[in-house]
Image (cartoon, rainbow, N blue to C red):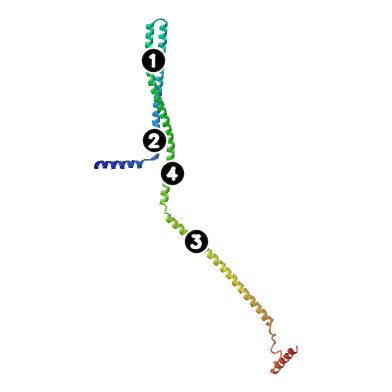
Amino acid sequence: MGLLDRIGMVVRSNVNAMVTAAEDPEKILEQSIIDMQEDLVQLRQAVAQSMAALKRQEQQYALANNQAQEWERRAMLAIQKGDENLAREALTRKKSHADSAASLKGSLDQQSAQVDLLKRNLIALEGKISEAKTKKDMLKARLQSAKAQENLNNMLGKINTNSASATFERMEERVLMAEAKASASSELGMDNLEGQFAQLEASSGVDDELMALKAKMMSGSAPNQPALQPADSRPAATPGQALDSELEALRRQMGS
């Protein structure tokens, strides 16, 4: 293969690739069905013409048969009348029409077979067109589904999922921080409230003790101690008197 042949092959290959890439499957399917329907119209016309020709041949065959039978009847009539020459002439006409009928019979059989074949082809083509329409609708639906899937994939491909995930994580972190702050604020509020009540209870205890002390002071006496007497209400005890008193108390204790 020469260089020019190889270049020509490459060019044709590129052209075919461009044509294939530019093909629209939906339009190609539509055009295929249109072409098949045009073939169907032509086939129907051919069937109609063949059937018309078959009908004419049948009429010609029937006419030739009738003519042959008619001349045979006339030949019999001539024999009955004793005219053999006329009978011979009638038989000659009969033979001519009989030969025509035989020739028409062969052509009639061929035409009938051709019409049957055309009818079968017509039925088959109609079936193929119906099947093609069904397949076209199915392929069209699949093509639309594929295009929709491709568009969806292209849209998903343009979405930066990493950036979206990072944004959601950042927002989730903020929400968690806000919830933690709210919880801490609630706990601090409860601690302050409990502290206030603790201080209040502590101050209440001090106040109660202070009031009790005031009451004791106002009564002028303390538990387990003798009441104080004014200094000028009794004479000061001498050491001897104090000793006597202590002895007297000891005696009473021993006597008891």
Residue 228, image quadrant? bottom right
Three-letter residue code for mark 1: Ala
Three-letter residue code for mark 3: Leu
Q: Which disc, if any, is residue 145? A: 4
First along the sequence among labels 4 and 3: 4
> Which x, y percent locates residue 89?
37, 9
Q: On screen, 119 above or below 242?
A: above
Q: Which disc, if any, is residue 176? A: 3
Callout 4 touching callout 1 (CB < 8 Å): no
Residue located at (38% from left, 15% from top): 98
Three-letter residue code for mark 4: Ser
Foreground label between 3 and 1: 1
Q: Is residue 152 left or right of residue 211?
A: left
Q: Which disc, if any, is residue 98? A: 1
**Disc 2 to disc 3, how far (Cα)?**
64 Å
Foreground label between 4 and 3: 4
Where disc 2 sits, the SS reads: helix
